[in-house]
Image: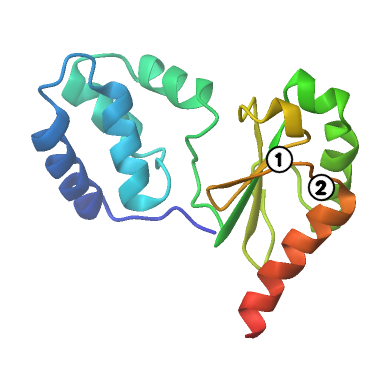
Amino acid sequence: MSSTISSAALDQHLDRIFADLGALEGPLLPILHALQADLGHVPKDALPLIAERLNITRAEVHGVVSFYHDFREEPAGRHVVKLCRAEACQAMGANRVADHARAALGVDWHETTPDGVTLEPVFCLGLCACGPAALVDGEVVGRVDEARFDTIVDGFKAKVTA
């Protein structure tokens, strides 16, 4: 997937976002979240524009975007599967499920399959008692093993063919 957006369109998005959020104290995170909500990602071309408008360095903006795992440089697929990587889930087999997921989808973390499934790590979903846990298109799912992962992915394919 490509993250191409014209400079004019990007400026329009940023104008609207800054009109709504620019006066906040510490507006960088809300601005980045709003831009990702609008576009499905935070384009690299937006970083220097945001830095200039906030009178901070590009490095500061880049540091925030790269620190928080939820920000994407490219749009996600139609379906997003986030697998918990925290210790409690690891103790319940999350590493095995993660290895299976990457192999079954043929992608690595932060990548998207040709049919639109994005795989992402997440560090704790708060479902530790039911690990390994996943967040599937915004819905928390517990006790995810390899078979349950396959069922989830098969459900995506069934929706496409239905």
Q: Position of residue 22 (x, y in %)?
A: 14, 27
Secondary structure under tag 2 reads helix
Label 1: few (<14), some (14–19) or many (≥20) C-alpha neighbours in 10 Å: some
Which kind of residue does numbered mark 2 sit on? Answer: Arg
Image quadrant in which the N terminus is located: bottom right
Q: In terms of image quadrants, where is residue 16?
A: top left
Of 62 and 149, the residue lying toward us: 149
Secondary structure under tag 1 reads loop
Residue positioned 64% across, 25% down in the render:
124
Q: Is residue 132 left or right of residue 56?
A: right
Image quadrant in which the C terminus is located: bottom right
Q: Is residue 9 left or right of residue 126?
A: left
Q: In terms of image quadrants, where is residue 115?
A: bottom right
Q: In terms of image quadrants, where is residue 34?
A: top left
Of 61 and 159, the residue lying toward us: 159
Q: Is residue 60 left or right of residue 53?
A: right
Of 59 and 85, the residue lying toward us: 85
Disc with the residue nearer the chain's start (1 vs 2): 2
Q: Position of residue 32 (x, y in %)?
A: 33, 33
Residue positioned 79% across, 42% down in the render:
143
Q: Vertically, is 25 above or below 3?
A: above
Q: Vertically, is 5 above or below 115?
A: above
How far apart are labels 1 and 2 at the CA level? 8 Å
Which residue in the protein does label 1 denote? Answer: 109
Which residue in the protein does label 2 denote? Answer: 102
Identify the colour scheme used: rainbow
Q: Position of residue 17 (x, y in %)?
A: 18, 39
Residue positioned 72% across, 22% down in the render:
86
Label 1–label 2 contact, CB within 8 A: yes
Q: Position of residue 146 (x, y in %)?
A: 88, 50
Residue positioned 78% across, 35% down in the render:
132
